[in-house]
Amino acid sequence: MDFSNIARVFSSYNYRLFFAGQLTSRIGTWMQRTAIIWVIYTMTDSVLTVGLAIFAEQFPSFLLSPVGGIAADRYDRYKFLMLTQVVSALQAVALTLFYHFGFHSIGLLLILSTVLGIANAFDVPARQAMINDIVKSTEDLPGAIALNSSLNNFTRLAGPALAGIVLAKFGATICFASNAISFIAVLLCLYLMKLPKHVPLKKNKNPWLEFKEGLEYTKKEPEVGHTLLLSALICLLVATYNTLQPYFARDIFNGDAQTYGYINAATGLGALVSTLFIASQKDSSRLKKLLFSNLILLGVGLIIMSYVKVLPLYLVMCFICGFGTMSTMPICNTIIQTVSPAHMRGRVVGFFAMATLGTLPVGSIFIGWLAKIIGPQYCQLGQGIISIGIALFFYNFLRKGINKREDPVIEETSIVT
């Protein structure tokens, strides 16, 4: 990674505020997610119910992300982002108060998770597109992409680790409260940012026609279509192995919330290293070949991890699988953003969010149901085999370089929202 580019990105007053606010907020969000999953598993002893909780939060992205992408292109992203953050903050406060006063209903937890999912469906496209409003120089955009991807993966590491400690010592209420408090930082940072006045775009087209136009583009452009299909299959059938981790933490290793936090932290560390490794690649033409190798690595890692019964070795395998899984999304994002024209990018980002964030909850439900029938270990073994199968199926596509357009403008995108 070229650290001089990173220094130039941080020279932006607005970007420093944006980064600081997101860093605090994302850690809080991951603490809440980890706590909800652990609470639901300990209450139900069911990985299927855990999958349902993930479904409740993330499935709205499948339905609404394309709408969020259109809105991010048509309206003031700054005001839009402020609104989504306020809604997310209110959800966190409500969750904290309900849980603190003894309302531990699974249905209530799922409803509040759905509210957060709806907010995220509109938040993610606006937040991603806003990077171009903050970082003006196209030369600094790759550094901004690397920083934001690293931020998301660092919070994936830090949030669950902190949640495991807090859950074990203080309980879930403090995790939920920590997330609610973290929104003070992000709202303050957004308020202090100094952005130029929004200039509304001409809205001559019907939003439905814009949606259809974007959909037709993804069908006609093989580079985009194949990449969306690959990322959707990975998120649907492979990346959802995390749904099974509460089972391994408690039933295989006889652990508690802290053990579950360690497993998530090891996965997050692998994801962080993966992001930095991808960012250090100067030759983007190698990215597709690298993706092929990492899918094979992920598959082998999941197969081995399925029957590991020694926690330190299991954590090493979690690191490897986190590396393989999280390299998929930045590479797929780079391919999509590189080949898409500027006027189509917001909608393509929406479809990418739909293919990734939207399929994860469906996959979580499916994996939870399948684990109940064949057992979590066989399920994870099967996911490893599927990862290798997907890599081989897309081999002809992945062995070629990226077919770049002449006018790429890259925006930051991540599966860890």
Image: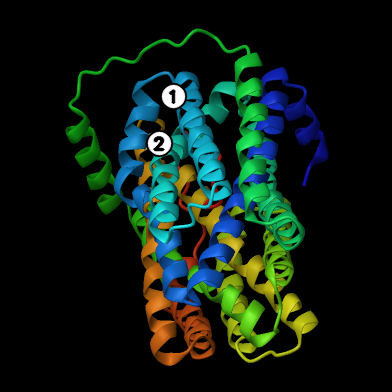
Quadrant in the rendering for residue 146: top right
Q: Is residue 136 visible?
A: no
Q: Residues within 10 Å of mark 1 (few under 14, many from 20)?
A: some
- Viewer-side residue, 301 vs 117: 117
Q: What residue type is labelled 2?
A: Phe
Q: Which of 289 and 25 is in front in this view?
A: 25
Residue 327 location in percent, x, y?
Answer: 60, 61
Horizontally, residue 77 falls left or right of residue 164, namely left
* Mark seen at residue 80: 1
Mark 2 crowdedness (10 Å alpha carbons): few <14, some 14-19, many ≥20 = many
Give the residue pinned by disc 2.
122
Name which of mark 2 and mark 1 comes first in the sequence: 1
Give the quarter of the image for residue 69: top left
Q: Do the residues labelled 2 and 1 touch (CB within 8 Å)?
A: yes
Q: Distance between the residues labelled 2 and 1?
A: 8 Å
x and y percent of residue 374 in the render? Answer: 42, 91
Q: Residue furthest front?
A: 101
Query: What residue is shown at x 50% (from left), y 28% (from top)?
Result: 86
Q: Where is residue 321 in the image (x, y as percent from the top left)?
A: 64, 73
| Residue sitting at x 66%, y 77% | 249
Residue at horizontal 72 percent and vertical 18 percent from the top: 13
Please identify the quarter of the rendering in which residue 12 is found: top right
